[in-house]
Structures are given as structure tokens and as C-alpha cells.
Image (cartoon, helix red, strand yellow):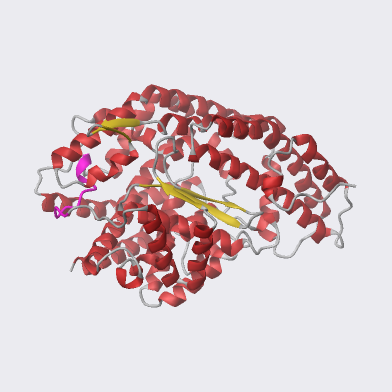
């Protein structure tokens, strides 16, 4: 008789596979019928949650301190010794449930996903999947130690970001060039890493008898509701509906700055010569004021964030030996999310916490669902949760609501955010189209010089308004600076689709904030129990790829910018 599984992951994390395996064996051998179904699913769900949470706790430890050799060793040991056999054991349980013909309540979407995962499973891919994670973690090791000397101090490349907002054009150019030189110093290392990753990914697809890695990834991501052709349609729609709007923003910026052409170090600075917004001095202040904003959006969402503050589930400061970027992951056994960021005192840091807060609230809203397989919505909707929260929170940035700014400063911050939405869609198209090309043409993509050339061509197509003359190396290696290409392949179109969904949620909020927030929360609470179009519809939006829907969003955003500009 097996003893009960631990109630917390902290008591489970050190278990070797020999201690875990009997629990999978017992579930595989236990009779499964309508009477035993709910108990069987609950037991499988708890085991899956323990493994999922263990993985993320180990992974997070490698990002909060990339110099922690013990954390790296523990993470790699999990990838080598626990993940492959547990995935094989999970496969047997999926097959058992599917073979039973049983249909648990609220399990239609999980069953659909289990069928797809079971069809994609290959035993020989298990070590490759672990290898891919280990190799992709090298990206953090390469980029996380990028430091430069600035004004007599060693600083991370991320810590140069405030300098890009300095009204002194010569100073921000110097900072920008210093950061770019540091990235170029890692050019060969990143090229080698990419080629290695591409090889692993091609083998994964070949083992699954699929024509290319994109086809493999489409199934792995459980993308049932749109195709690669839809993505290309979306790229064309962006070119038609958004690129002209982005050009208008860039031209207005060039005119206000009084420069002949916009250079890369001109795109973040305030075009009216105002100093950068300084929303906070300390991370504690960032946390407190974001908490006040979340309370204004919805008292329950505000309380969720207070839980994270009290339980130290926020790691928001930037420091040496910390991985770049920001993310939110969750611990389903503890029923808590965790937010990671690299704050340096800019408004972007506020946006990051609002964004990742949306992900955290998504987790909180789904923790009450009974089974692990019901928790995680498609990532295309997860980003509606985060980008939607940025927009839903935007009316409360002022000090009147406990936020960061005067009314004029808040208007400026909102204009910057709304402009960034319009500027993001073309960049998203570059990143997504680059990845489609890479996995459609892997022989060419295995030659970094051809990657450089294709990135350059896409940049000229979607982002023609900034003058990069004399900076051709920096422009063509821009794909090095997008971690998704290395670590989360073919994950970027989600941001573009979700941004369009978020703008639709926000459209309602402009006339009915309470109704928009209620619909938003109702959609979050569905977790993985509805289709992607149903999730969008519940939130008050439509999953769309067409130029007409994009044009309506562009018109709304440009109209609000003009209103705030007054």
C-alpha cells in the first residue's frame, strides 16, 4: 500500500524517480470505471501538479541567480532523470483514460488535447525534449552576464535602458552603441547555440514523422483553431492596416525631435524633450502602487496581488547574475503564482507588473478547477489576460487612485503605451514571419548569415521608418535579441492575436469598465474548459486575423491617443 503523496511540492522536490514511479504504476493498474473516475483523475491530477510545480521551482531558481551552480545542477538532473520517465508514464495514463471511453464533466477540451498529445508522443523524443530545454537555457547564461562599464561602474545591459530615455541625444547614442557592441561580442556564441537548437528541433519533428518542426510545434502547442496560413494572413493584415499607422507615429516623433531621420536611439526618448517618467524609487514602492491600481480594477484582483506581496512571490529588481526578461509562472499545488521581472525605475517596469499581474490573476481564477488538465488555457488567450490587464488598469495610473503619476504624466504614460501597441504589431510580424521561414527552410536557417539576411528583409518590409545606416550588423542580428526565438520557438504570434483581443476588451471598458472586468474575469475562470474562440467571446472579443478588425483597433487606439494628447 503506497503512502499518500505529499501535500506540498517542497516535500516532493527531492524524490528520485524510483520513489515517484510506483504512484504512476498504481494509477496505470487501478481499475477505471464511472465509479472510480473522479478519484482516479484527482490522484493523477495531484501527481501531475507536483511534477509541474517541481519543474517550475527548479527552473525559477536558475533564473533568479544564473551563477547558482547547485540550482543549475538540480534543474538539469530533473530534466535528465525525472522528466523523460514521467512523460512516458503520463502517456500511459492518457492512453488508459482515452481507452476507457469515459467522459468526465468539463473535460471535453482536455480530452481533445490528450488525444493530440497521445498521437504526438514518441519515446525517442523524451531525451531530446530535455536536451532542448538544457540547450535553450544556455541563452540565459550567455545574455545574463552581459555587462558594460558605464560612467565608471559595471552595469548590466538592461540597466542601460534608462539612458535611452535621456534627452541628450549624444549620451543615449553612446549607451545604445555600448549595449549593441556587447551583444555583438556574443554573436558567434549565439549563432552556435541557434544551430544546435535547430538540429534538436529538426530531429524532434523527424521522429514524429512530421514534415518540419513547425508542424510538430503546432501540434505540441495544441493549435486547433488557426493555421500557419492564418498567421501569414495576419502578417499581411498588419502590413496593410498597422504599418501605415506606425509610420505616422514615427513621423510625428521625427518632427517633434527636429531630426532629419530617426535613429535607433531616438525611438524611446520622449519626443518633446521631457525627462523620463520616474514612477518609483524602490521596488517596494512599485509593488505598493501596483497593488493600489489592481484594487481599483477589482477588489478581488487587488487581494490576489496582496497575497503575492505577503508571501514574497514577487522578484522584481534587476541585478547582476539574474536572467533577462520577465515572466509569470505558477505553482498549482501551492495554488500560487510567481512574478519575475527586471525593474530599473521606468514606466516599462510598471507595464511589466501590470502585464504579469494579468497572468497571475488568470492562475488565481483557475486554481479552483478540480483537475490539472483543466487549468491552463491556450497561450493565445493567456496573453489576453495579461495585455487586457494593462489596458483595464490604465485609467488608475494617477495618484488619485494610489498610482504613480499626476494626470498629465498618466496621459503621457498612456499615450506611450497605446503607441507601443501600434508599433508592436509590425515587430511581432517580423519575429513570427522569421520563425515561419526558419522552420520551413531549415537548411537555410542553419546558416546564420542567411538568418541575418532574412531578418533584414523582414525588417525592411514591416519597420522601414528608422534609419539604421552604418548599423547594418546591429540590425541584421536583431533576432539574437529576441529570446523567444531561442527559448520558446514559434511563440510570438500569440502576443499579436492577444493584443487585438485585449483592445476589443478595452473597447467595452471605455463605456462599461465594470462590465468589461466582469466578462474578463469570467473568461479567465474557464481555464482550459472552452475552445480558444469561446474564451475570446466570453471576454467580449473575437479571435481575428483580418485587416478589417485590425483597422478598427488601429482607429480606436489612434483616436484615444489624439484625445489624450489634448
Q: Residue at x 59, y 56 (%)?
A: 336
Q: Is residue 475 above or below residue 447?
A: below
Query: In the image shown, does 143 or 220 lie closer to the viewer?
Result: 143
Query: In the image shown, does 258 or 217 lie closer to the viewer?
Result: 258
User: Where is residue 394 shown, x and y percent of the image?
Assistant: 35, 66
Residue 129 visible in rendering: no
Question: What range of the chain is rendered magenta?
Answer: 264-274
Q: Residue at x 22, y 69 (%)?
A: 563
On-image quarter of the C terminus = bottom left
Q: Relative to residue 457, is residue 368 drawn left or right?
A: right
User: Where is residue 467 shown, x and y percent of the image?
Assistant: 19, 38
Magenta highlight on residue 269: yes
Q: Relative to residue 95, is residue 187 drawn left or right?
A: left
**Which quadrant of the figure has residue 76?**
top right
Query: In the image shown, does 149 or 129 lie closer to the viewer?
Result: 149
Count the marks: how many? 0
Query: In the image shown, does 287 or 191 lie closer to the viewer?
Result: 287
Magenta span: predominant SS is loop
User: Where is residue 433 shown, x and y percent of the image?
Assistant: 40, 41
User: Where is residue 146 shown, x and y percent of the image?
Assistant: 37, 31
Q: Is residue 77 above or below residue 99?
A: above
Q: Residue at x 52, y 53 (%)?
A: 313
Q: Is residue 14 above or below residue 252?
A: above
Residue 505 visible in rendering: yes
Magenta highlight on residue 165: no
Q: Relative to residue 435, is residue 409 drawn left or right?
A: left
Q: Residue at x 67, y 33 (%)?
A: 126
Q: Is residue 10 above or below residue 410?
A: above
Amino acid at each position: 500500500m503506497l503512502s499518500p503523496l505529499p501535500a506540498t511540492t517542497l516535500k516532493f522536490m527531492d524524490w528520485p524517480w524510483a520513489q515517484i514511479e510506483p504512484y504512476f504504476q498504481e494509477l496505470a493498474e487501478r481499475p477505471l470505471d464511472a465509479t472510480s473516475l473522479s478519484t482516479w483523475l484527482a490522484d493523477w491530477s495531484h501527481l501531475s501538479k507536483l511534477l509541474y510545480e517541481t519543474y517550475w521551482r527548479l527552473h525559477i531558481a536558475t533564473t533568479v541567480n544564473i551563477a547558482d551552480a547547485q540550482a543549475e545542477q538540480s534543474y538539469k538532473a530533473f530534466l535528465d532523470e525525472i522528466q523523460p520517465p514521467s512523460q512516458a508514464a503520463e502517456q500511459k495514463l492518457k492512453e488508459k483514460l482515452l481507452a476507457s471511453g469515459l467522459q468526465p464533466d468539463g473535460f471535453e477540451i482536455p480530452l481533445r488535447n490528450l488525444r493530440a498529445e497521445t498521437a504526438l508522443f514518441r519515446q525517442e523524443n523524451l531525451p531530446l525534449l530535455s536536451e532542448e530545454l538544457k540547450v535553450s537555457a544556455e541563452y540565459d547564461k550567455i545574455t545574463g552576464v552581459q555587462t558594460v562599464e558605464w560612467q565608471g561602474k559595471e552595469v548590466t545591459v538592461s540597466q542601460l535602458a534608462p539612458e535611452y530615455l535621456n534627452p541628450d541625444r549624444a549620451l543615449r547614442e553612446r549607451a545604445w552603441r555600448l549595449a549593441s557592441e556587447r551583444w555583438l561580442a556574443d554573436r558567434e556564441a549565439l549563432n552556435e547555440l541557434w544551430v544546435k537548437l535547430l538540429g534538436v528541433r529538426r530531429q524532434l519533428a523527424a521522429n514524429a514523422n512530421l514534415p518540419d518542426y513547425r508542424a510538430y510545434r503546432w501540434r505540441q502547442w495544441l493549435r486547433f483553431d488557426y493555421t500557419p496560413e492564418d498567421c501569414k494572413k495576419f502578417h499581411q493584415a498588419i502590413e496593410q492596416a498597422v504599418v501605415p499607422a506606425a509610420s505616422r507615429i514615427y513621423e510625428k516623433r521625427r518632427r517633434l525631435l527636429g531630426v532629419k531621420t530617426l535613429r535607433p536611439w531616438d525611438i524611446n526618448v520622449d519626443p518633446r524633450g521631457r525627462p523620463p517618467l520616474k514612477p518609483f524609487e524602490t521596488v517596494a514602492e512599485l509593488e505598493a502602487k501596483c497593488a493600489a491600481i489592481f484594487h481599483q480594477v477589482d477588489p478581488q484582483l487587488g487581494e490576489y496581488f496582496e497575497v503575492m506581496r505577503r508571501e514574497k512571490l514577487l522578484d522584481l529588481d534587476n541585478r547582476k547574475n539574474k536572467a533577462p526578461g520577465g515572466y509569470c509562472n505558477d505553482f498549482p499545488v501551492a495554488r500560487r503564482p510567481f512574478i519575475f521581472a527586471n525593474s530599473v525605475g521606468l514606466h516599462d517596469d510598471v507595464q511589466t507588473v501590470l502585464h504579469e499581474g494579468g497572468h497571475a490573476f488568470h492562475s488565481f481564477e483557475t486554481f479552483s478547477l478540480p483537475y490539472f488538465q483543466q487549468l491552463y488555457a491556450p497561450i493565445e488567450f493567456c496573453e489576453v489576460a495579461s495585455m487586457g490587464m494593462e489596458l483595464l488598469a490604465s485609467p488608475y495610473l494617477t495618484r488619485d487612485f494610489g498610482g504613480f503619476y499626476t494626470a498629465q504624466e498618466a496621459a503621457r504614460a498612456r499615450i506611450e503605451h497605446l503607441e507601443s501597441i501600434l508599433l508592436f504589431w509590425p515587430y511581432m510580424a517580423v519575429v513570427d514571419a522569421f520563425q515561419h521561414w526558419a522552420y520551413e527552410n531549415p537548411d537555410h536557417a542553419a546558416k546564420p548569415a542567411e538568418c541575418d539576411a532574412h531578418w533584414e528583409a523582414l525588417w525592411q518590409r514591416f519597420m522601414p521608418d528608422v534609419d539604421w545606416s552604418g548599423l547594418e550588423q546591429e540590425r541584421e542580428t536583431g533576432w539574437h535579441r529576441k529570446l523567444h526565438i531561442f527559448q520558446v520557438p514559434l511563440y510570438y504570434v500569440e502576443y499579436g492575436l492577444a493584443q487585438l483581443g485585449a483592445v476589443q476588451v478595452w473597447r467595452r471598458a471605455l463605456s462599461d469598465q465594470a462590465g468589461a472586468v466582469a466578462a474578463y474575469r469570467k473568461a479567465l475562470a474557464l481555464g482550459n474548459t472552452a475552445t480558444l474562440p469561446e474564451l475570446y467571446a466570453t471576454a467580449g472579443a473575437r479571435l481575428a486575423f483580418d485587416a478589417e478588425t485590425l483597422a478598427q483597433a488601429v482607429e480606436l487606439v489612434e483616436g484615444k491617443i489624439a484625445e489624450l494628447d489634448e
